Image (cartoon, helix red, strand yellow):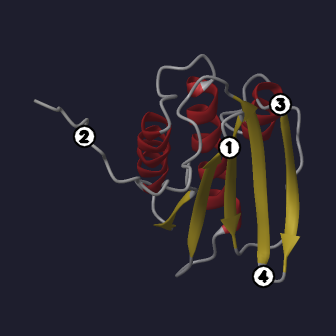
């Protein structure tokens, strides 16, 4: 499956838009109804929310990158904000603070990479059984019809 990416504005409606983008990607890969599909979508929402709230300065955008290699889905959320996020234990009454905790619990692997301008937070989910990665088209051979002798 070819990777897919999309940029999102620094606005509240970008989080559900990022989730719809991820759902369309999973559907294209044959994974929309897969066991891990819900985990992927929840983590896209959490990472997009974190980018929006903590990582995207005014006037900037964040980028969601998705890739499926036939075995795993990789989600990357790139932003231009400073600092490296970390998992915090949220108090019972807190309304937020659980995003990376959820990502850490649901993803097979996750991490943070620093860039020249900002960071990328990524997560990987084992997802077998979807569409296989796009193969190079094979050259078609000329068709030869059988000859009938009368």
**Residue highlighted by disc 3:** 108
Q: Residues within 10 Å of mark 3 (few under 14, many from 20)?
A: few
C-alpha distance separating marks 1 and 2: 38 Å
Q: Secondary structure at mark 1?
A: loop
Of labels 4 and 2, the one closer to you: 2
- What residue is drawn where x is 88% and y is 39%? 88
C-alpha distance separating marks 3 and 2: 52 Å
Residue 20 is drawn in which quadrant?
A: top left
Which numbered marker is on residue 117? 4
Q: Secondary structure at mark 2?
A: loop
- Res 97 visible: no
**Residue highlighted by disc 2:** 145
Q: For the C terminus, give its image quadrant.
A: top left
C-alpha distance separating marks 4 and 1: 28 Å
Is disc 1 in contact with disc 3, using a CB cutoff of under 8 Å? no
- Which label's residue is closer to the chain start, 4 or 2? 4
State left or right for residue 82 relative to residue 148.
Answer: right
- What residue is drawn where x is 62% and y is 34%? 40
99 lies above or below 7: above
Is disc 4 in contact with disc 2, using a CB cutoff of under 8 Å? no
C-alpha distance separating marks 1 and 3: 15 Å
């Amino acid at each position: 499956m070819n990777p897919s990416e999309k940029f999102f504005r620094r606005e509240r409606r970008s989080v559900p838009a990022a989730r719809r983008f991820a759902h369309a990607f999973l559907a294209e890969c044959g994974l929309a109804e897969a066991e891990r599909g819900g985990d992927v979508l929840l983590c896209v929402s959490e990472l997009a929310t974190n980018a929006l709230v903590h990582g995207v300065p005014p006037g900037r955008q964040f980028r969601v990158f998705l890739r499926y290699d036939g075995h795993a889905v990789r989600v990357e959320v790139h932003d231009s904000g400073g600092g490296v996020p970390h998992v915090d234990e949220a108090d019972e009454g807190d309304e937020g603070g659980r995003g990376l905790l959820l990502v850490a619990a649901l993803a097979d692997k996750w991490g943070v990479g620093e860039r020249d301008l900002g960071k990328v937070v990524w997560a990987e989910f084992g997802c077998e059984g979807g569409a296989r990665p796009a193969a190079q088209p094979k050259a078609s051979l000329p068709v030869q019809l059988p000859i009938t002798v009368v």
